[in-house]
Image (cartoon, grey):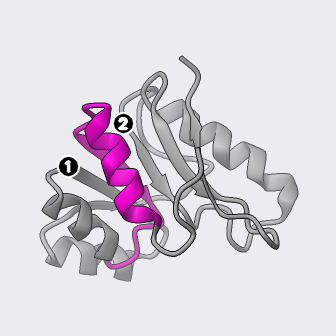
Amino acid sequence: MELSAQDPFPDFVALLKAEGRRGVLGLDCGQGTDGLRFVRSGIHFTGVDPSEENVHSARARGLEASVAAAPALPFADSVFPAVWAPDALAGLPPEEWEGVVRELQRVAAPGAPIAVVRPEPGEGYTVVRSPA
């Protein structure tokens, strides 16, 4: 499934609501801007970011967030109804992409939507699924 290249967020939220998914893991959550958008949309948000400063800012905004990064997320298998990771592959060499996506699939519930962007020219937002 392709999401809007301009603002993929509304499409992803609509997908989550249509599928009855009430929670999302936000990878590289930054200071929590997208996290607040999820919460305002009625979707529970759990964020992770490699920066302690960003996590502190996200928590100050009332979000659940912890310091972590793919490909080694500190969560059990299959715990998140969905994953929001549009920046997960940015800045990584292409040979690392598969490992990151595999880790996102590991923490996502069976069949869960995972929003990612392959940072190549012309590539947009894509929803992949964790194995059912």
**Magenta stretch containing residue 22, yes or no?**
yes
Q: CA distance from mark 2 to mark 1?
A: 10 Å
* Above-or-below relation of 83 to 38: above
Residue 69 drawn at (x, y percent): 53, 58
Segment colored magenta:
8-31
Instruction: Judge from the rendering whether residue 59 lies leftward or rightward of residue 33; answer left or right.
Output: left
Q: Are marks 2 and 1 in contact (CB under 8 Å)?
A: no
Residue at the limit of the structure toward the top, as seen here: 132
Residue placed under numbered mark 2 in the picture? 80
Q: Earlier in the sequence, mark 2 or mark 1?
A: 1
- Identify the residue at image location x=21%, y=69%: 36
Q: Secondary structure at mark 1?
A: strand
Amino acid type of the residue tagged 1 in the rendering? His
Amino acid type of the residue tagged 2 in the rendering? Phe
Residue 75 drawn at (x, y percent): 41, 38
- Identify the residue at image location x=45%, y=54%: 84
Residue placed under numbered mark 1 in the picture? 44
- Identify the residue at image location x=72%, y=74%: 91
Occupied quadrant, residue 93: bottom right
Mark 1 Cα shell of 10 Å, populated few (<14), some (14-19), many (≥20): some
* Above-or-below relation of 128 to 121: above
* Above-or-below relation of 121 to 69: below
Occupied quadrant, residue 88: bottom right
User: Closest to the observer: 98 or 119?
Assistant: 119
Occupied quadrant, residue 10: bottom left
Residue 12 drawn at (x, y percent): 40, 52
Residue 59 drawn at (x, y percent): 20, 71
**Magenta stretch containing residue 101, yes or no?**
no
Q: Secondary structure at mark 2?
A: loop
